[in-house]
Each structure stands twice: as structure tokens, then as C-alpha cells.
Amino acid sequence: HNMIKLYQEGNGFYGIDWNEKLSSYTTHVILPEADEWTLSSFRKYKKVFEDARKQMKEMGIKSVLGLCETKKERKFNMLFGYKPVPNGIILTEDGVLNYLVKLEI
């Protein structure tokens, strides 16, 4: 399945693709590295995220999963409304354990 781009600016990216193993869309986030995490950038991405969420809703998507390599990443996703999946630790193809988080659209 192809990646569906919901947002892209510079090297910042937010998209989804279908994950056969999880039978769910999974989100892919690349944060612009140069971007300092200030309150104003947080507000900006909150808006970007809400727009992306609207797009997913229009596509008929009910929920998406996020894969987080670290607890810090998981915490970050939770700032945007993702919830931890109980016992949601999976091994990805590259042999890395990931925490699963879920977002209801």
C-alpha cells in the first residue's frame, strides 16, 4: 500500500499507510529537525494535526495506530490525543520493539 501524505512542509511530514499485520492504518511522522519545540510551534502542529484528522475522517478512517520506538515518542504522541494500547508492544520488521498508540478519529 502506498503512503498517503496528509501534510508536508520542508522536511516535516505526516502521513498514513495500511499495515497488513496490524490490519490498520499507521501514522508516520517526521518532525522538522530545525524546529525548536516552542509553544507556538506546538500550536502550529496541533492545527496541522487537526487538519490531517479531518482528512482522515473524510476518507472514512475510524482510527489509526502509531508506532513509537521510545517512551518519549509515545508521550509526544499522547500530547496529540493518541492513547497507549494495553500490552501494545510489537516487534517491527527491523527487529525493534515499538510501543503501540491508537488515535480515534
Image (tube, rainbow, N blue to C red):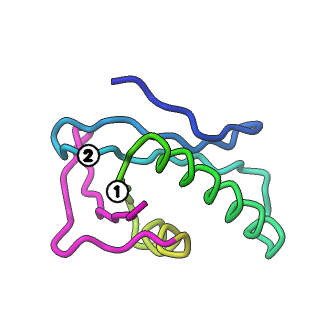
Residue 62 is inside the magenta segment: no
Q: Tell me the SS state at disc 2.
A: strand
The N terminus - image quarter: top left
Q: How crowded is mark 2: few (under 14 residues within 10 Å), some or many (20 or more)?
A: some
Residue 17 vertical position relative to residue 69 in the rendered view, above or below: above
Q: Tell me the SS state at disc 1.
A: strand
Residue 89 is inside the magenta segment: yes
Residue 3 percent location from the top left of the image: 45, 29
* Main secondary structure of the magenta stretch: strand
Pointer 2 with pointer 1, Cβ within 8 A: yes
Q: Residue furthest right?
A: 40
Residue 99 percent location from the top left of the image: 30, 64
The C terminus - image quarter: bottom left
Count of marks, rendered view? 2
Q: Residue at x 77, y 62 (%)?
A: 44
Q: Residue at x 58, y 49 (%)?
A: 52
The numbered dot on residue 63 is: 1
The numbered dot on residue 24 is: 2
Q: How crowded is mark 1: few (under 14 residues within 10 Å), some or many (20 or more)?
A: some
For marks 2 and 1, give the CA distance. Answer: 8 Å
Residue 66 percent location from the top left of the image: 38, 56
Q: What segment is highlighted magenta in the picture? A: 81-105
In the rendered structure, the answer to whether residue 84 lies left or right of residue 76 reads left
Q: Which residue is drawn at 43% across and 69% down?
A: 82
Q: Return the residue nearer the eye: 35 or 83.
A: 83
Disc 2 residue type (three-letter): Ser
Q: Earlier in the sequence, mark 2 or mark 1?
A: 2
